[in-house]
């Protein structure tokens, strides 16, 4: 089973092969996803789908290191990227390097992802100068939710499209190996993808990116609080889980579980 590296991802763009990325937050799901996808992202989306926060802003470095290390133990093939949480990289490039190192050294990540374009140029360049691969992220950036006035599609106006293209090119020039495009019109994502040499990975950015990513809870139908337009549920697991737990509860209450098949005895039959 060949290990995926940054060189493979760059080669996939050059050869027109689509990159598959999914989020994971623990060992068990990492093991399931590992042979099936190219990149596993330990996203700060764990703030909403795992911890139940309203936004990703409360997620800490300790949270990210803990979940990244769990995922790292469950994967062997896929390339592992960890999100840099809010305020782990915005304070200074030096602090960003320190936290990126933690995600690799203690978390077992192979790259970090951070939000922002032109304004993050020096930070990305500083991290990559330490031989830490960086995945950029422009467009709808959830850590900027208050500045953006909510989860709004970005890049519909001419000036906004221009800024997105400038952001993408700045991320590439700073040394990032790939770029997430989130919540932007398909035509804008297509233009960016054709304008940069690094792979683009879309989420709510249409079909013309070099790859696609979804949050695992959305893809599997485990997170039901809301469903963005760009999400396709490939399974509806919440009702399956509910039915299994309902059956377990019924059997316990009726004294049917555990039965002899699931019980130990002094002398096994």
Image: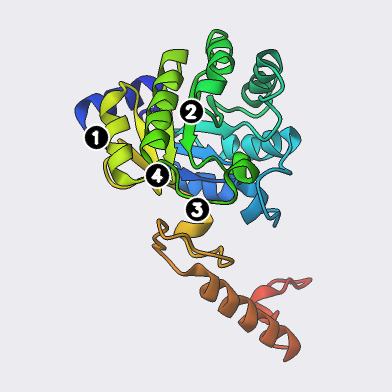
Q: Position of residue 30 (x, y in %)?
A: 53, 44
What SS does tag 4 mark?
Answer: loop
| Mark 2 touches mark 4? (CB < 8 Å) | no
Please report the residue visible at 55 percent of the width from the left and 32 percent of the height from the top.
115
User: Which residue is more in the foreground, 123 or 33?
Assistant: 123
Residue matched to label 1: 17
Residue matched to label 2: 136
Q: Position of residue 160 (x, y in %)?
A: 42, 36
How far is the residue under mark 3 from the one under mark 2?
20 Å
Please report the residue visible at 69 percent of the width from the left and 82 percent of the height from the top.
249
Of the numbered discs 3 and 2, the one sitting upstream in the chain is 2
How far is the residue under mark 2 from the one under mark 1?
20 Å
What SS does tag 3 mark?
Answer: helix
Evaluate whether residue 263 shows in this view: yes
How far is the residue under mark 3 from the one under mark 1?
22 Å
Mark 1 surroundings: few (<14), some (14-19) or many (≥20) residues within 10 A: few
Of the numbered discs 3 and 1, the one sitting upstream in the chain is 1
- In the rendered view, does 76 fall on the left or right side of 191? right
Residue matched to label 3: 216
Evaluate whether residue 269 shows in this view: no
| Mark 3 touches mark 1? (CB < 8 Å) | no
Disc ID at residue 184:
4
Q: Position of residue 109 (x, y in %)?
A: 57, 28
């Amino acid at each position: 089973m060949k290990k995926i590296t940054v060189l493979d991802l760059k080669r996939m763009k050059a050869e027109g092969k689509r990159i598959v990325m999914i989020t994971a937050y623990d060992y068990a799901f990492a093991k399931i996803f590992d042979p099936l996808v190219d990149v596993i992202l330990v996203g700060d989306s764990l703030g909403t789908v795992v911890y139940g926060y309203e936004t990703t802003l409360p997620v800490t470095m300790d949270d990210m290191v803990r979940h990244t290390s769990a995922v790292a133990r469950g994967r062997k093939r896929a390339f592992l990227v960890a999100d840099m949480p809010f305020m782990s990289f915005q304070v200074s490039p030096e602090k960003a390097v320190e936290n990126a190192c933690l995600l690799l050294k203690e978390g077992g990540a192979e790259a970090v992802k951070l939000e922002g374009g032109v304004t993050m140029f020096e930070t990305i360049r500083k991290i990559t100068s330490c031989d830490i691969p960086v995945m950029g992220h422009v467009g709808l950036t959830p850590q900027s939710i208050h500045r953006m006035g909510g989860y709004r599609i970005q890049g519909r106006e001419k000036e906004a499209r221009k800024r997105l293209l400038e952001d993408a090119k700045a991320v590439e020039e700073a040394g990032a190996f790939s770029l997430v495009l989130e919540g932007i019109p398909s035509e804008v994502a297509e233009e960016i993808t054709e304008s940069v040499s690094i792979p683009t990975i879309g989420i709510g950015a249409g079909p013309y990116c070099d790859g696609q990513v979804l949050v695992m809870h959305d893809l599997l139908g485990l997170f039901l609080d809301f469903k963005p337009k760009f999400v396709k549920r490939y399974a509806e697991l919440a009702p399956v889980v509910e039915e299994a737990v309902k059956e377990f509860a019924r059997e316990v209450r009726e004294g049917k579980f555990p039965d002899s098949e699931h019980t130990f005895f002094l002398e096994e039959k």
